[in-house]
Amino acid sequence: MNIAEYPEPIDTFVRWLHEHVTITKSSYSSACILSTQGLDGFPNARNVSLKCIEKPYFIITGSTLSRKGKEIETHPKVALTFWWEETKRQVRIQGTASQISEKDAHFFFKDRSYESQIVSSISKQGMPLKKLESLRVRFRESIKSQRPIEKPTHWSGWKIKPYRIEFLEFNTSRFHNRVLYTQSEDSWNITQLQP
């Protein structure tokens, strides 16, 4: 990665993601790790799916009542980490998350599979559950009914505005190529980092 050839980090990310998607065998090509600050002070990390990029935002979705939803509401500074095995590249993004519009939430909900819509409508993500079978019964009944699923009021998403984006090209010698972009008003400061 030559810094002079990549002046804009989001365009670079899109290019790298496209190169990954075209060769990966993974069914989850947009998967990444979302890290948040826990309400108890401990960090939390989990796999999520990047839904889209609406420059300058990276968009993810989920339940606002989930642990991640509550943590983002309390501590909106978050991180996304991408690791692409086939291209041996990593991207780390730090930024601030804010909730997407209700219109956008409806769009992304309708884009989900029917089964995913059902799970979102019958489940309180991450909450304790006495009997898993009771939830399975509700799931099967909803599948049989084939009725349209309305977006739950708690289901939404977040747009993450990046403050820092670090690109790493892995090398087996550990002489990695690392470039850090840091937001400064309306431009990006670019720094080559040591491996």
Image: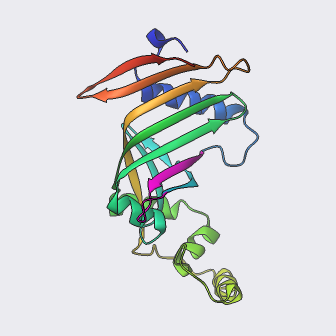
Q: Which residue is painted at 54% across and 41% down in the image?
A: 81
Nearer to the camera, 19 or 42: 42
Quadrant of the image containing the N terminus: top right
> Residue 134 at what x, y percent from top left?
67, 90
Mark yes or no: residue 156 visible. Answer: no
Q: Which residue is drawn at the image coordinates 59% and 74% (left, top)?
A: 119
- Residue 150 relative to residue 101: left or right: right
Q: Which range of residues does the magenta coloring cover?
A: 31-42
Q: Is residue 29 magenta?
A: no
Residue 116 seen by the camera: yes
Residue furthest to the right? 25
Residue closest to the eye, 135 or 88: 88
Residue shown at the point (34%, 20%) measured from the top left: 189
Q: How is the image coloured?
A: rainbow
Name the residue located 32 percent from the left edge and 29 percent from the top edge.
183
Relative vertical location of residue 178 with respect to residue 65 in this rendering, above or below: above
Counting the numbered discs, the total is: 0
- Vertical order, 178 against 63 (above or below): above
Q: Is residue 175 placed above or below 143 in the rendered structure?
A: above
Residue 59 coordinates in the image, percent (x, y) = 44, 49
Q: Position of residue 63 (x, y in %)?
A: 46, 68
